Amino acid sequence: MWRTLDYDFGGTDTVLVKMTDGTHVVESTADVELRDRTAVLHGLHILSGGGRNTLGLWALPGLISWAKAQLDVDHRRIEGATCTSGAGPGCVPPPLAF
């Protein structure tokens, strides 16, 4: 079960969130836009979380459900940021809708 450790909206649409499932601590930032019952996250960056592929696909559904409940929305859409490192710098990942 995910829970918020800390968050900061900083007076803008950009949010910094630190969350945990009791095993992993994940910090992320994104520009959040609310459209009807959908939260759209632009430029999502995972700042820390134990390294690449630490959480795996098994953790994603729980994390998404938790985030939708926290934001009180029915849908969440992630529009990723341009990759700056790794195997494909410069690429833009396709949007993900949940």
Image: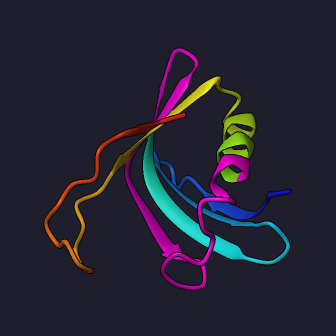
- How has the structure been colored for display? rainbow
Expressed as whole percent of the image width and height from the top left, the position of residue 22 reads 85, 73
Residue plotted at (29% across, 57% down): 81
Q: Quadrant of residue 3?
A: bottom right
Magenta residues?
A: 33-62
Expressed as whole percent of the image width and height from the top left, the position of residue 15 reads 52, 54
Residue plotted at (73% across, 50% down): 62
Is residue 55 highlighted in magenta?
A: yes
Left or right: residue 6 compared with residue 57: right
- Please count the marks in the image: 0
Expressed as whole percent of the image width and height from the top left, the position of residue 45 reads 42, 64
**What is the residue that sits farthest to the left in this orientation?**
90
- The correct choice, above or below, for 84 with respect to 64 in the image is below
- The correct choice, above or below, for 4 with respect to 62 in the image is below
Q: In which quarter of the image is the C terminus?
A: top right
Expressed as whole percent of the image width and height from the top left, the position of residue 55 reads 63, 71
Left or right: residue 36 compared with residue 96: right
Residue plotted at (48% across, 80% down): 52
Residue plotted at (64% across, 23% down): 74
**What is the residue that sits farthest to the top in this orientation?**
36
Q: In which quarter of the image is the N terminus?
A: bottom right
Left or right: residue 26 compared with residue 76: right
Is residue 95 highlighted in magenta?
A: no
